[in-house]
């Protein structure tokens, strides 16, 4: 029978190979390779016996299992210990059986391999090849005498934990026991492997999921969540690409920086949700204005950027942006009007310098804001000097406010006849450590631009409240800047300060200019009414210098009007100046306002103003703005004059 091949469904050698109907995972298939027909026959009897004892009677197997592995060790699949047994008489045949079995998905649980199987390959080689094909099969090397040392065999075959030895001649029960134990073990290993495979599959699924969400995250990292526009990161990637596209060509890279005007006011007064909505609507308008002519991104807050490689298209884009931004925005019952300031920079043709272009666009934006908002300016080098100067000034000013290095001077106002001091006006003074006294017009404008004006204004009010304790019977007037008055928390903060410093509001007057009314009459009127309700007086400063219509005069409850210096200056200089003064005074009187003339420097001016009916005079002819101690002296001196 040498060289022959036999197979049987767990029965005897010589019968044809059969298939078990159980699932591959449960079917324990045995492979026996031995060149000796008698030995194969012996195997057959043992296995047939084993099948007989377990096929119809699981309890037997359970009992055996329990005997071998302890109570509770019975496998759930004990009804079929052996699916089938394949008998081979040569190593090569055994190897190809393993190969076929694996291909069908019905691997062997155990392979019993005789060590010597002439004329073909020996057991060691057979085992080695089988192991190479199937790492899970339990290999039992059956040997009569040691041709090889076990350590050598283990080394050659691998997976020593699945390698066993059976010495010939073996006892039937020995074979039974080994077959049972290894079949059981194979099932357990398989269960573990299956479980592992499930886990691996699950892990792979999770990994794929992770990769997908990573890709999403990457996309999100480049996108602004609020507007859906690319963000700073998205922009800088695009800029890198565009830079490469332009290099060495005659094309130019243009960068636009955009900033929504007065966004902070909208955000502060109408709340963040409205602010966010404004940003979104504005972003949509940018998208529309830019179209295919460029790439738009949100840099943060109300700042956006547009880049373009089409220099010729920029003018059109800018026009559309400026026009689009000024269309009214409707948001949950609010209609907001605003505009956009734009800074523009172009890189040199073919030599795009990214950082430089962005810096220049930023400077141009700053200049556009300073130029009065709602405009687009192209970068020119002189902007840089202006801005550096302004930035330094703003920095120094912030420092001066925080370290209390500002001062208030007070300019006494006198009655129409020029004698009794009726009130004092607080005027800011800043003695810059290097530049000396800086005109308040200059640094107040810097404060406006650098968003320092509210802080500065708060400092002035606190200081004026404190200084006024020196002249409790005189009214002190305080200048208010428009943005200070517009701030939503202005009234509340002021009320707190009044309580904290025990101030009598009727002894203070706030001076506001017409520009307050031009920007937003409703808010100004509301705030002014609140100030009046608290007891403060309100005077309209620099009357005639602004462009506001006269209609507001009757809508806002002013107490006083101050005729702008320029009209006073014209007296005796320009023809008709007197007539103008008379009609202004007439208007003020008709409205029931107290009238002050500013900038009175000469006796002739005084005379004209007095005869026109002005109630109070302010000017160098009477008093210059003075530090606190000198103000006190002037007040006392005036009292002495009256008394004498
Ligand atoms: P203003 O409110 O019209 O203040 C009067 C200005 O006229 C003061 O200039 C004062 O020194 C000047 N002046 C007074 N009499 C005469 C005169 O006879 N002839 C001439 N040529 N000028 C005279 P100052 O102190 O330089 O202030 C300029 C402006 O700065 C102020 O104009 C006011 O708008 C603003 N300002 C000053 N202090 C403050 C402040 O605390 N807060 C705010 N928001 N603005 C202030
Ligand atoms: Ca004033
Ligand atoms: Ca004035």
Image (tube, rainbow, N blue to C red):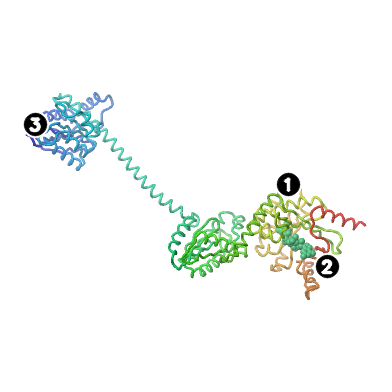
Q: Which mark is residue 517?
A: none
Ligand 1 closer than 8 Å to label 2 CB:
no
Q: Is residue 465 visible?
A: yes
Q: Position of residue 225 (x, y in %)?
A: 48, 54
Secondary structure at badge 1 equals helix
Q: Position of residue 141 (x, y in %)?
A: 18, 30
* Residue where numbered disc 1 is placed: 500
Q: Considering depth in this image, is 14 or 89 the residue closer to the camera? A: 89
Instruction: Give the image quarter of residue 44.
Output: top left
Secondary structure at badge 3 equals helix
- Residue at 39%, 47% (x, y): give it: 210
Secondary structure at badge 2 equals loop
Ligand 1 closer than 8 Å to label 1 CB:
no
* Residue where numbered disc 2 is placed: 602
- Badges 1 and 3: C-beta atoms under 8 Å apart? no
First of labels 1, 3 by sequence position:
3
Rate crowding at label 3 as few (under 14), some (14 to 19) or many (20 or more) other CA atoms within 10 Å. Answer: many
Rate crowding at label 2 as few (under 14), some (14 to 19) or many (20 or more) other CA atoms within 10 Å. Answer: some
- Residue at 32%, 43% (x, y): give it: 201
158 displayed left or right of 637: left
Q: Considering depth in this image, is 328 or 247 the residue closer to the camera? A: 247
462 displayed left or right of 25: right
Q: Position of residue 157 (x, y in %)?
A: 21, 34
Name the front one of labels 2 and 1.
Answer: 2
Q: Is residue 479 visible?
A: no
Toward the bottom, the furthest residue is: 575
* Residue where numbered disc 3 is placed: 37
Q: Considering depth in this image, is 351 or 10 the residue closer to the camera? A: 351
209 displayed left or right of 254: left
């Amino acid at each position: 029978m040498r060289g022959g091949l036999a197979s049987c469904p767990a029965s005897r050698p010589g019968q044809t190979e059969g298939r078990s109907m159980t699932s591959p995972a449960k079917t324990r298939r045995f492979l026996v390779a031995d060149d000796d027909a008698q030995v194969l026959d012996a195997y057959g009897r043992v296995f047939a016996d084993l099948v007989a004892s377990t096929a119809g009677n699981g309890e037997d197997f359970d009992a055996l299992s329990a005997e071998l592995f302890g109570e509770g060790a019975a496998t759930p699949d004990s009804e079929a210990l052996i699916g089938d047994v394949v008998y081979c008489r040569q190593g090569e045949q055994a190897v190809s059986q393993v190969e076929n079995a694996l291909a069908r998905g019905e691997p062997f649980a155990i392979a019993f391999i005789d060590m010597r199987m002439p004329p073909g390959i020996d057991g060691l080689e057979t085992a080695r090849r089988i192991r190479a094909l199937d790492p899970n099969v339990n290999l039992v090397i059956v040997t009569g005498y040691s041709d090889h040392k076990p350590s050598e065999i283990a080394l050659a075959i691998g997976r020593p934990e699945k390698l066993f030895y059976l010495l010939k001649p073996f006892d039937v029960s020995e074979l039974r026991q080994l077959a049972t134990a290894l079949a059981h073990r194979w099932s357990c290993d398989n269960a573990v492997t299956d479980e592992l495979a499930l886990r691996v599959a699950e892990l792979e699924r999770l990994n794929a999921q992770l990769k997908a969400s990573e890709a999403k995250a990457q996309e999100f990292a480049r996108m602004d969540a609020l507007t859906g526009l690319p963000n700073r990161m998205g922009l800088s990637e695009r800029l890198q690409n565009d830079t490469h596209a332009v290099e060495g060509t005659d094309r130019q890279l243009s960068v636009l920086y955009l900033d929504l005007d007065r966004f902070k006011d909208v955000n502060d007064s109408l709340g963040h949700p409205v602010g966010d909505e404004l940003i979104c609507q504005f972003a949509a308008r940018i998208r529309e204005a830019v179209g295919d002519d460029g790439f738009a991104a949100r840099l943060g807050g109300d700042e956006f950027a547009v880049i373009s490689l089409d220099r010729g298209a920029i003018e059109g884009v800018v026009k559309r942006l400026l026009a689009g931004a000024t269309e009214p925005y409707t948001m949950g019952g609010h209609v907001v009007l605003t505009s956009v300031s734009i800074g523009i920079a172009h890189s040199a043709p073919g030599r795009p310098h990214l950082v430089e272009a962005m810096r220049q666009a930023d400077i141009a934006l700053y200049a556009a804001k300073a130029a009065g908002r709602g405009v687009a300016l192209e970068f020119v080098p002189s902007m840089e000097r202006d801005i550096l100067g302004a930035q330094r000034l703003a920095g120094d000013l912030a420092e001066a406010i925080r370290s209390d290095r500002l001062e208030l001077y007070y300019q006494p106002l006198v009655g129409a006849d020029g004698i009794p001091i009726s009130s004092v006006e607080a005027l800011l003074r800043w003695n810059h450590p290097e530049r000396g006294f800086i005109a308040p017009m200059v640094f107040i404008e810097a404060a406006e631009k650098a968003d320092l004006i509210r802080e500065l204004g708060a400092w002035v009010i606190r200081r004026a409240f404190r200084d006024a304790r020196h002249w409790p019977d005189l009214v002190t007037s305080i200048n208010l800047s428009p943005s200070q008055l517009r701030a939503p928390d202005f009234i509340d903060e002021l009320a707190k300060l009044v309580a904290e410093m025990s101030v009598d509001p009727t002894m203070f007057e706030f001076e506001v200019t017409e520009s307050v009314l031009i920007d937003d009459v409703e808010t100004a009127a509301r705030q002014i009414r609140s100030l009046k309700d608290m007891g403060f007086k309100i005077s309209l400063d620099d009357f005639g210098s602004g462009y506001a219509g006269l209609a507001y005069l009757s809508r806002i409850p002013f107490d006083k009007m101050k005729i702008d210096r320029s009209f006073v200056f014209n007296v005796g200089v320009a023809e008709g100046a007197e007539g103008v003064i008379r009609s202004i005074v007439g208007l003020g009187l008709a409205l029931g306002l107290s009238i002050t003339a500013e900038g009175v420097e000469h006796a002739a001016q005084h005379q004209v103003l007095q005869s026109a009916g002005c109630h109070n005079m302010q000017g160098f002819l009477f008093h210059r703005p003075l530090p606190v101690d000198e103000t006190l002296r002037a007040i006392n001196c005036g009292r002495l004059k009256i008394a004498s």
